[in-house]
Image: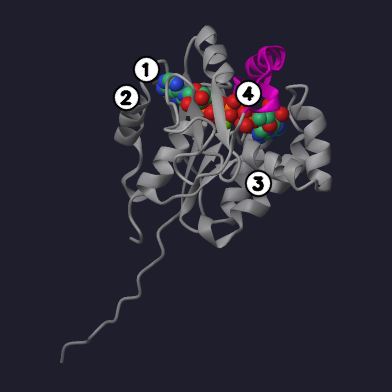
Amino acid sequence: MRTRYSYVKKPAMPTYIVFIGPPGVGKGTQANILAERTGLPHISSGDLFRENIQGQTELGKLAQTYINRGELVPDDVTIAMIRERLSHPDCARGALMDGFPRTPAQADAFTEMLADFGGKVDLVPCIFAPEAMLVERLSGRWTCRAQGHIFHQVNNPPQKPGVCDIDGSELYQRDDDKIETVRRRIQVYTAQTALLIAYYRQRGLLAEINGGRAIEEVTADLLAILPSRCYAETN
Ligand code: AP5
Ligand code: MG
């Protein structure tokens, strides 16, 4: 007699993609587009801090003192904030990480945290572009107040100035996009975050992406290297 088996679908292993790159290179722009294409949530540590600043939470008050100077917020509070965010149900399939981890200590903590969530870092696209281009992009950036959608007054203008095409909310210029703060952020990236390039290269996870081209060309390169399970609802 034939035995009949009933199969229970095993949940897919979550996928975590980590975007690295200097300020203004296009991490947020690309993560927003890939979130649309894959359904994975876009987790931006900068956006989480800005939400806390807007909500005047204790974390926001602390973060603001660092962000206004272009310095990194201390690792312990940053790690705790990200762990809390990744525990939400919308991250069950994984996440597109934009701006975290940003130091080797954060990268080690991230590996441990993902083990608790049953996953690991799958891919680290490192986007690069010349410094003059970063400064030009940040000086013309407009960000949506409600959901962080990103525009540029020349490269990617909204249909109506000052209004987000996607959700109709107000567009604003970030306080840390002042030229002197941008210069400091680039220095901090070089001193502290660029260490992650070697860190993830040694682990065979790094993919270098030329961000000095049109938004669509950068997206095409990223789509070509994303693991296929990014697109799957379940395995
Ligand atoms: P965060 O918000 O992460 O800022 P950032 O890393 O400095 O990067 P940006 O958001 O400025 O640039 P982006 O690469 O996302 O570029 P975007 O897509 O917007 O962090 C802010 C601060 O928070 C930090 O300084 C720190 O204080 C704190 N912080 C955050 N994370 C932390 C952590 N883990 N630990 C400690 N502290 C932390 O694009 C820029 C512009 O260019 C836009 O106008 C866009 O339209 C345009 N653009 C994008 N791509 C293209 C293209 N290909 N061609 C032409 N224009 C383009
Ligand atoms: Mg960003």
Marks 1,2: beta carbons within 8 A:
yes
Q: Nearer the viewer, mark 3 or mark 2?
A: 2
- How crowded pointer 3 is (Cα within 10 Å; few <14, some 14-19, many 20+) is rated as some
Q: Residue furthest bottom?
A: 1
What residue sits right under mark 2 in the picture?
A: 217
Q: Amino acid at mark 2?
A: Glu
The answer to whether residue 61 is left or right of residue 48 is right
What residue sits right under mark 3 in the picture?
A: 82
| Residue 196 in magenta stretch | no
Q: Position of residue 37 (x, y in %)?
A: 35, 45
- Is the CB of mark 2 within 8 Å of ligand 1? yes
As drawn, the label of residue 193 is 4
Q: CA distance from mark 1 to mark 3?
A: 30 Å
The answer to whether residue 142 is left or right of residue 221 is right
Q: Secondary structure at mark 4?
A: helix
Q: Secondary structure at mark 2?
A: helix
* For marks 1 and 3 on the same chain, the one whose residue lies earlier in the sequence: 3
Q: Residue furthest left?
A: 1
**Residue that appears at 64% across and 19% down:** 189
- How crowded pointer 4 is (Cα within 10 Å; few <14, some 14-19, many 20+) is rated as many
Residues drawn in magenta: 173-195
Q: CA distance from mark 3 to mark 2?
A: 30 Å
| Residue 190 in magenta stretch | yes
